[in-house]
Image (cartoon, helix red, strand yellow):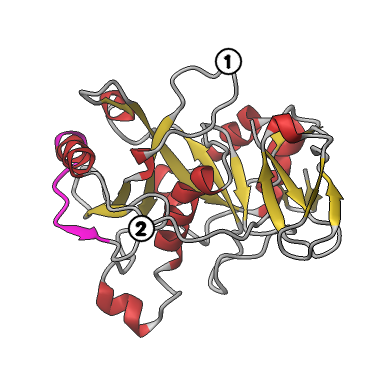
Amino acid sequence: MPFAFRCPHCEVGYQVKDELAGKQTKCKKCGQVILLKPPVSEVTPGGSKLYRHARRDRELDLAAGDGELIDAISEHIEKYVGHSPNVFHELISDLVHLDVHTVPPTSQRNWHTCITSGMSERPMHAPPGVENSDYAELVLCLPPTWQLSEAAFKIDNQRFYWPIYWLKTLARLPHEYDTWLGAGHTVPNGDPPKPFHHTTKMCCWLTLGPIWFDKKFATLKLADGRLINFLAIIPIYAEEMQLKLNKGTDVLAGKLASLPLTELMNPSRKNVAVKRFGFF
């Protein structure tokens, strides 16, 4: 599996193939001789493996989109989630063509459901031993009062758009950095993590199975053999991510399960990793 490497002279990032570890080369940006050393594997006290991804310079890799894939996912959404009257289409796509399908609130599911199509155009780089985890799409649920329209985005580009921005960012992350996303992963907004927007203190994402939907929605098998897993992304606080890193995903998931279902979609909800007089 390729590893992230940053030039010690100019800080430009690379993804380096395993077979090149220990070899010398010249940095393409600054020309200095560098020794390609893989990072030391980091495992948290809770048993989570840390992946650090270095930003790298590369050319735009245009993607036109897969019409059959989009149709299959659209039918899957219609069958198990509901009618999607609005789809945010990309005009210019890098690596994969990402559309975001939105299903409005209903009496059964009183929240907006946003689902990607296009992340599964390419396989992810899942490690050996992880079965049927090469392809994924992401699901994000938002409060019923959330504004999801081009007009709302134009009025304040970040106030309502940041969840959609991150939905696309996370969908591209595995392809941009030759890595993968699976249930139980956490992704921070920087290091140290910063709030997604000034209206929330949340600054990290947690991926889980799509717990709010029919179990049959969790996977989609295409005619060409691709098995697509649908992963829910949930915004969380820095303390909650640290709890997961220290004590494991099950501990954090158990505390989140104590919240009312709709609270998981609330950017100002209670922080389950904070006690009244301190932190866990």
The amino acid marked with disc number 2 is: Pro
Q: Which residues are magenta?
A: 79-89
| Residue at x-position 75% and y-position 30% | 46
Between 52 and 178, which is closer to the camera in this rendering? 178
Q: Which residue is mark 1?
A: 129
Magenta highlight on residue 43: no
The reply to whether residue 137 is in sight is: yes
Residues at marks 1 and 2 touching, judged by CB atoms closer than 8 Å: no
Looking at marks 1 and 2 on the same chain, the residue that comes earlier in the sequence is marked by 1
- Provide the secondary structure element on which disc 2 rests: loop
Residue 126: % across, % down: 54, 28
| Residue at x-position 18% and y-position 44% | 67
| Side (left or right) of 215 relative to 48 | left
| Side (left or right) of 68 relative to 255 | left
From what the image shows, is residue 152 above or below residue 164?
below
Residue 82: % across, % down: 16, 43
| Side (left or right) of 246 relative to 205 | right
Q: Residue 201 falls in which quadrant of the image?
A: bottom right
Residue 236: % across, % down: 58, 51
